[in-house]
Image (cartoon, rainbow, N blue to C red):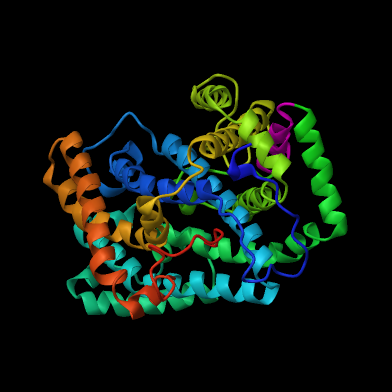
Amino acid sequence: MPRLLADEPRAPHAPVPAQQPQHRSHELDWLRAFIILALVPGHAIGFFTANTAKYLGTQYASPIGLSTLMIVGTWGMALLFLVAGAAAYHMLVRRSPRRFIGDRSVRLLIPFLFACLTLIPLQDYLIVHAFPDVLDRIPAPPGLDPHLTASPLTFYRWFVAGYVSFLMHYTPQYEFIFWSHLWFIPRLLAISLLTLPLLLWLRGARGTRLIAWLATLCERQRGAVFLLALPLALILAVFGWQWQGWQVVGAPDGANVLSQFLYYTLVYVYGFVLYSDVRLRQAVRRDGGMISLVVAIVAFIITQIPGFGVGNQALAHDLSAGGIMAAMLRATAAWLCIVSILGLSMRFLAFTNRFGQYLTEASYPFYVLHLAVLYLIGLPLLASGAPVVVDFLAMVILTYGITLAVYELFVRRVRPVRALFGMSKKSAMGRKSTPASA
């Protein structure tokens, strides 16, 4: 069995001493980096959907619908939550619960607050300045007026006041204005803190026996790991979940928000459980592959066929037989996709190199920075009316290049700025590998 799946002692409640070596699950680093890098073309494609054209008033309408794009993107974000749950296992092996809370809070909250007060208002200003009519087509907070863009300082004052009001009177439909792509961070922090008692219980005697029972089942029964899709399917079937970007924030409800939160929470816990027992990782490595990935794609396509009798995915609560079937198919396809990609990564990404180390360190700052850069580049291109392919390629290539340049010149090399982006004081390049912790 490869070193990746080498047997490990089950972690007691006490953290492992600092001098005791622990292998790093390198596939988690690669997956995290690849998912975050994929956000650039994913967000760029979003500019060219018919839904976005309706909101911004552009003439673009690609054959890729925003609904389809958001579902595929949700799979990737679910995988990111699973990676975070697996990283939590590694962190709790080496850290006390108190230090775990401190590390997660500092490394998530500081970049989040910094970006919310700098990058997010810049993104909002760019959108309203380039397409002022968008405010007539989306649910806008009170006081947000196109005339505010006449003065960046005036707009920023409104944003800060609006942000405080948003936090004091939380409204999900305004998340895309005040949190934008950073919605992942407060959810991850909340999930990390709320599930900590459960994770500690899972590391205790009873929890270990439960995980061992599941590991034995998955070890003996090929494909048993896919049964973990059933609770996910139940969440979507009962609560419903619109996976449609602006259509979601435009008309959310409590059940919709709760469904999303429960879904990601369960996937996070799954990540912790899968990395708690080597036999579960062996089962994922054995069962996850191209066949299950193809099955996931077919199930996804079925949910996209109009009039196929699997419900209307645009409805938050379609409790018809077709609606329940569509919800279960989406959840099953998502879990099949997650297990497939994780299994393939265990086979082919169980290594590291200098490039991988660089991406591991750069991934979080890149995630925080990339959308502001994409807006700076993409919004003028949208207004230019250039061909779709030209605009898209220019957006993607320039966003990658400029974001990495900003990271390299102004983040990675400047210690105070490193702290603002949740990075350690010293670069990880060349240091001895330690368990995944982000």
Q: Nearer the viewer, residue 255 or 261?
A: 261
Image location (x, y in percent) of residue 198:
76, 61
Q: Position of residue 151 (x, y in %)?
A: 19, 75
Q: Nearer the viewer, residue 293 or 326?
A: 293
Residue at far top of view: 308
Quadrant (top left, top right, bottom left, bottom right) of the N terminus: top right
Q: Nearer the viewer, residue 10 or 261?
A: 10
Inspect the magenta stretch and tell me whether residue 352 lies in it.
no
Quarter residue 330 falls in: top right
Q: Which residues are magenta?
A: 222-237
Q: Does the rendering let one see residue 132?
A: no
Residue ID at (21%, 62%)? 129
* Image height of 240 relative to 171, above or below: above
Horizontal side of residue 37 vs 207, given as left or right? left
- Count the numbered circles shown: 0
Residue 215 horizontal side relative to residue 336, left or right: right
Residue at image location 44% in from the left, 71% down from the top: 422
Residue ID at (58%, 66%): 189
- Asked whether residue 328 appears in the rendered view, the answer is yes
254 vs 143: above or below? above
Residue found at x 37% / y 73%: 418
Q: Determine whether 180 is above or below 76 in the image.
A: below
What predominant SS class does the magenta segment belong to? helix
**Quadrant of residue 386 in the image?**
top left
Q: Along the horizontal axis of the image, is 216 left or right of 380?
A: right
Q: Is residue 224 magenta?
A: yes
Q: Please state the horizontal and vertical placement of residue 360, each as a whole percent of the image.
A: 42, 56
Find residue 405 and report its horizontal and vertical position in percent.
22, 61
